[in-house]
Amino acid sequence: MPFLKNLWYVAANAYELDEPMVSRKICNEQILMFRTSSGEVAAMDDKCPHRFVKLSLGKRVGDNVQCGYHGLAFGRDGSCVDMPNDPEYAIPPCVKSYPAVERYGVIWLWMGDKERADPAKIPAFDFITDPDFAVSQGVSHYKANYQLFTDNLLDLSHVHYLHPHLHQGAQFAHFENKLKVEGDTIWSMLWRHRYPVTESSREMWGMDVDEVEGQGHSRWNAPSLMYVPTAFWEHGKTIDEGIQSPSAHLITPETEYTSHYFWAIGRNYRQDDEEISRRNSEGVKFVFDTQDGPMIESQQQAMGLSTDFLDHKPVILKADAAGVMARRMLKRWIKEEQREAEAASEAIAAE
């Protein structure tokens, strides 16, 4: 299935652009990114129009990128700013550029029509840059279609089987799970009433209680952007008085069969404890690299060259409702975008 193009995709964690250049494949396009001296983010095809080698094999010259093969240099907008051996070339070559925005600690790229690139359409992940939260970030790579991660993260029932150490003493059947749709946003809502607090959690959270109220909702926005505002609070108090540990799971397709997984996890307790930050980072990476990742990769292997899970006529469980709806929404939007592109091409051809 083709990708939805008129959309913001996460291409890097902001800290990665501390390097002179970052090259990453997004939606089958190899893209070069860098931060200019003014702090703006530049993004362009990582391919010189001369011999088609990667520009990332060259070097930065100020706010330009110089090809390492013949010295052609390109500015942040993809325009050629220097041709050392052909200064009077009739039609200066250029490289395709992409609208890029740095927001919420990550780099967002618009893959479609530049005129439609509206940063206001970027979903909110405020906690990542909120000083009230200590936040750890990272990125992993998996051999599976990006929509399989949507299925996984909107199905909150799998946690108790794939990650039994995360909710000791609790059962999914005792929780309240509901689907909510708000425009282009899907919520898999999960309330954990009378959630048992383990001894280690009491020590970590500073709560001297046996049970708390809790939530573990999962919010989806296309293409596969998940926000999970996990929280626990004592009975009789509010969520704002409790422990909050929001997380972001930002899945970007590299190809139809491989995905980049950008993640961030925050906490509003013991923010200055670097040991907790280290354990959180290692814990998230361990869970996905050894549990979710292998399971999802196994699913992709079973599906072969197919990327549409529903085409295989799977058994659908109650907890799958949000994931199925997200798939159907995305499929409809892709078809609508394709029809629009075909109509535009036909109109141009008719002129």
Image (cartoon, helix red, strand yellow):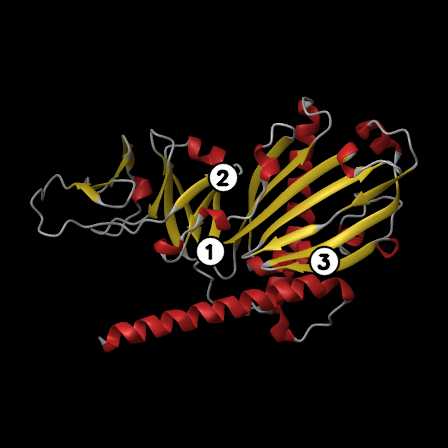
In which quarter of the view is residue 43 placed?
Answer: top left
What is the three-letter code of the residue carrying label 2?
Arg
- Which residue does the image show at 52% across and 36% down from the upper left? 105
Q: Is residue 206 visible?
A: yes
Residue annotated with mark 1: 7
Query: Crowding at label 3, few (<14), some or many (≥20) Cα neighbours within 10 Å?
Result: many
Mark number displayed over residue 88: none
C-alpha distance separating marks 3 and 2 = 27 Å
Q: Earlier in the sequence, mark 3 or mark 1?
A: 1
In which quarter of the view is residue 298 placed?
Answer: bottom right
What is the three-letter code of the residue carrying label 1?
Leu
Image quadrant in which the C terminus is located = bottom left
In the picture, measured across the screen, residue 127 lies left or right of residue 84, that is right
C-alpha distance separating marks 3 and 1 = 24 Å
Q: In the displayed orientation, state which residue is furthest to the top.
A: 272
Query: Crowding at label 2, few (<14), some or many (≥20) Cα neighbours within 10 Å?
Result: some
Q: Position of residue 191 (x, y in %)?
A: 81, 50
Q: In the displayed orientation, state which residue is furthest to the bottom.
A: 350
Q: Secondary structure at mark 3?
A: loop
Circles 3, 1 touching at the beta carbon (< 8 Å): no
Q: Earlier in the sequence, mark 3 or mark 2?
A: 2
Q: In the displayed orientation, state which residue is furthest to the left.
A: 88
Mark number displayed over residue 155: 3
Q: Is residue 297 visible?
A: no
132 is higher (above) or lower (below) than 220: above
What is the three-letter code of the residue carrying label 3?
Asp
Residue annotated with mark 2: 103
